[in-house]
Image: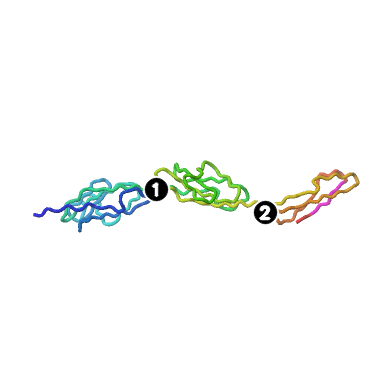
Amino acid sequence: METPGQAAVPMFSPAAGTYSGSQSITLSSASSGAVICYNTTGSPATNGSTSCATGTLYTGPVAVSSSETLYAVAGGTGYNDSPLVNASYVIQSSVATPTFSPAAGTYTSAQSVTISDATSGATIYYTTNGTAPTTSSTAYTGPITVSSTETLEAIAVATGDTNSAVASVAYTISSLPNFTLGASPASLTVDSGDQGTVTLTVTPENGFDSPVSLACSGLPSGPHAPSSRRR
């Protein structure tokens, strides 16, 4: 009576290792017609046919979404079970992408910007000069004052996880339309019965284009100053 041969050990693809996301693991054996049984507890076995005495019969890629070890044997009709083999996979999750408050937009005054991250214990690094942040960039420790138009970029880092995606937010600081008022001369002394002239200059700022009404108050009884309206 012929003694069944031993099936070739299963092969794992991709190989055991550390990965930054879920993996789809394929199992194969060089023995033609061999079946593969696998599990995560270390005791798969065939029953000498096309099913498994213990473990799960391999029929297609195995999804590995968290760190674990796969154990497998090959065997089946006409074969003795191969030696038990295993492959350990470390799945690193990604740190959550940082978020900014207030949101990107146009503001009329300086903003105090906070950066937060949903991953507990994550450290945030940021830049304000348009370069991608790294762990050598400035570490976030508290609100950032944005007083002029600029773009903030940030990443979050946590031990055992892959770095987050880069978050970017643009702030436009646009001052409200306004004007300045100048007087020439800056001061004027007028004797009783005389009159004097002061030239007032309205200088628009930030696109100001509205009428300006001027009036004088606080004069003693008798003297008066004409009101004026300038654009």
Specify whether 78 is left or right of 164.
left
Camera-side residue of 24 and 132: 132
Three-letter residue code for mark 1: Ser
Q: In the image, residue 108 lies at what x, y percent?
A: 63, 50
| Residue carrying label 1 | 93
Q: CA distance from mark 2 to mark 1?
A: 48 Å
Specify whether 16 is left or right of 54.
right
Q: In the image, residue 176 lies at what x, y percent?
A: 66, 52
Camera-side residue of 115 and 140: 140
Which quadrant holds the N terminus? bottom left
Determine the secondary structure under disc 1.
Answer: loop
Three-letter residue code for mark 2: Asn
Q: In the image, residue 225 lies at what x, y percent?
A: 84, 49
| Residue carrying label 2 | 206
- Report the span colored magenta: 223-228
Specify whether 198 is left or right of 6.
right
Which quadrant holds the C terminus? bottom right
Determine the secondary structure under disc 2.
Answer: loop
